[in-house]
Structure formats: C-alpha cells, structure tokens
Amino acid sequence: MFDTPLEALLTVSLLILSVSTLGLVYRVIKGPSTPDRVMALDSIGINLIAITAIISILLKTDAFLEVILLIGVIAFVGTVAFSKFLQKGDAIEYDRNS
C-alpha cells in the first residue's frame, strides 16, 4: 500500500489535519463568541497550508508552493481585517475629510 514509512506518516498526518479542519469548521459555525470564530478561521488557514504542503510532498512536486504562499497571505490579511473589525467596528477606514 505505501512504498515508504514516510508516505504512511504523511497520509496519517493528512487524515489528522482533515479531521481537525472539520472540527474547526464546526467551531466557526457554532462558536460561542466572535473571537473564537476568528481563531478557528485562522486555524483553518494554517491547516490548509499544511494540507497543501503534505499533498505537494506526496505528489513529489513543487507546483503548490505558490498556492501555499497565497493561502498564507490571504489568511493573514483576513485575520488582520477581522481583528480590526472587532476592535473598531470597521474593517476599512475612509478618509471623510477629502
């Protein structure tokens, strides 16, 4: 079934990350508070990066490295926007003087 122990370990890691992501999706939907939902969304982004990296290793390609970078940037910007929204009530500030 598996050629090397590394492939078996990566497959088990992929399964664990997938189950973890499903649990985080539940936390986003049913989270008791908005900060809990934001933390779950950020964790989903981290899990997606890890899942993409494991798939890239299993397929023996570096074609997904740009995708990993893009997911990381989008997750970071989303977390910053959510935290700014929670702090000030606005995610985008408009200069009303001009």
Image (cartoon, helix red, strand yellow):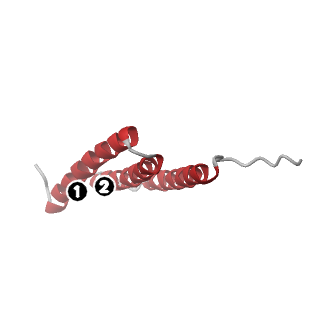
Quadrant in which residue 68 is drawn: bottom left
> At 14% from the left edge and 61% from the top edge, which residue is drawn?
5
Compared across the picture, whether 26 is left or right of 81 comes to: left
Mark sitting on residue 10? 1
Compared across the picture, whether 22 is left or right of 77 comes to: left
Q: Nearer the viewer, residue 14 or 26?
A: 26
Q: Position of residue 11 (x, y in %)?
A: 20, 52
Q: Position of residue 86 (x, y in %)?
A: 57, 50
**Element under label 2?**
helix
Nearer-N-terminus badge (2/1)? 1
> At 28% from the left edge and 51% from the top edge, which residue is drawn?
17
Q: Residues within 10 Å of mark 1 (few under 14, many from 20)?
A: some
> Residue reaching furthest right?
98
> At 38% from the left edge and 38% from the top edge, which residue is drawn?
29
Quadrant in which residue 9 is drawn: bottom left
> Residue reaching furthest front?
32
Compared across the picture, whether 22 is left or right of 85 comes to: left
Mark sitting on residue 44? none
> Residue reaching furthest left?
1
Report the number of discs.
2
The kind of residue tagged 2 is Ile
Q: Is residue 4 above or below residue 40?
A: below
Q: Nearer the viewer, residue 89 or 3?
A: 89
Compared across the picture, whether 8 is left or right of 63 comes to: left
Q: Residues within 10 Å of mark 2 (few under 14, many from 20)?
A: some
Q: Position of residue 47 (x, y in %)?
A: 36, 52
Q: Nearer the viewer, residue 38 or 58?
A: 38
Q: CA distance from mark 2 to mark 1?
A: 6 Å
> Circles 2 and 1: CB distance less than 8 Å?
yes
Q: Nearer the viewer, residue 66 or 43?
A: 43
According to the picture, the residue beneath numbered tag 2 turns out to be 54
